[in-house]
Image (cartoon, grey):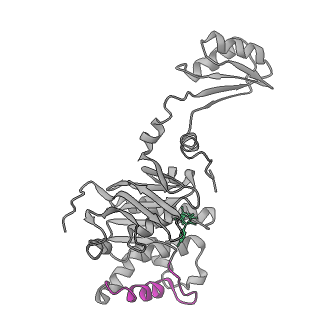
Amino acid sequence: MTTGAGDHSIVTRGLTKRFRGGQVAVDDLHLSVPRGSVFGFLGPNGSGKTTTIRMLLGLVTPTGGAWELLGAPMPGGIPAALPRVGALVEGPAFYPYLSGEANLRRYDAADPAADPRTASRRIALALERVGLSAAARKRYRAYSLGMRQRLAIAAALLGPRELLVLDEPTNGLDPQGTREVRALVKEIAADGTTVFVSSHLLAEVEQMCTHLGVMRTGRLVAQGSLAELRELNAGETAVVRVETPDTAEAASVLAGLGLAGVRTGDGEAGAELGAVAPERITAALVAAGVAVRGLAVRRPSLEDVFVGLTGEGFDVDG
Ligand SMILES: Nc1ncnc2c1ncn2[C@@H]1O[C@H](COP(=O)(O)OP(=O)(O)OP(=O)(O)O)[C@@H](O)[C@H]1O
């Protein structure tokens, strides 16, 4: 099948979901997910991420707008496009006393589109893909949290996929499990699969994504590559902070270098960095005999951009 949208795995135009009772969960969404990207769909709880994902996959009917998956207009294109899309939404329920492999076998058998003749090979490939070949015969209940989630991702990879959709795949995982899933997402993307992954954790999407879309109360408030989004606060300036008992001397050195916004506080002096290299500041402080206990440069972060866009902070580390 040809894919008209070419460069994009997901495109939505004005996608909207109003639930009975009047609540608008997703409002006029225009998403563009470039092919080959790892697209982080970021937003606080309740901002409409899951509802969007369910609409994209045809699990919930939109009340307005249009969308395409892998170049096929939806919902008509569902039979053609969905077999090429792997999805993990509210993870599959696995049997604790069956092995990982046996669980995938049951899961695959329940999929009418899956060919039973190729099941063994596809299951072995999926287990290998998520690094569970050696644990394939272990009971699910003996799996770590990370292994369980990797098995859930294997269930989404039981066929060759061009797009993988993951709804909060690290939710409820311990730090080790989170690292495993993050590494796996990167590997899957490196093989050329587009990954669309939702999260309420900025730090997390920042570590694994190439592109971001940011949701706030049902609306997409920004999208683009990480670099494009960082540009949004390119006007903001970095600041330098010097930890020292000689605050007045340090402040005069900073002013002498032409830095703006010089201020002093308890055991520290600071200023806007501007175009001055931090190593020049260090050298000038030392030359002036200032006892430098610490020097830190703080550049505006992606988090600052999002706080500005969404009006609220994100959990930075969960
Ligand atoms: N079936 C439903 N009926 C009515 N309202 C709903 C329904 N499903 C979701 N909502 C509401 O729509 C809004 C968006 O929910 P959604 O689950 O899409 O957000 P989310 O960003 O995925 O959050 P979370 O991470 O908590 O799942 C919420 O206010 C939610 O209460």
Of residues 293 and 220, the one nearer the viewer is 220
As drawn, which residue projects farthest toward the front?
21
Instruction: Look at the image and say whether residue 316 sits in the magenta stretch.
Output: no
Apparent side of residue 262 relative to residue 20 in the rendered image (left or right) = right
Q: Is residue 106 magenta?
A: yes
- Residue 36, given in percent of the width and then of the height, sits at 33, 56
Closer to the camera, 222 or 3?
222
Q: In which quarter of the image is the C terminus?
A: bottom right
Question: In which quadrant of the rendered view does residue 177 lie?
Answer: bottom right
Residue 119 pos. (x, y %) = 34, 85
The image quadrant that residue 47 belongs to is bottom right
* Quadrant of the image where one finds ligand 1: bottom right
* Stretch of the chain drawn in magenta: 92-113
Image position, residue 247 (x, y; %)? 77, 18
- Residue shown at 48% from the left, 78% from the top: 134
Q: Relative to 293, is 120 above or below? A: below
Quadrant of the rendering where the N terminus is positioned: bottom left
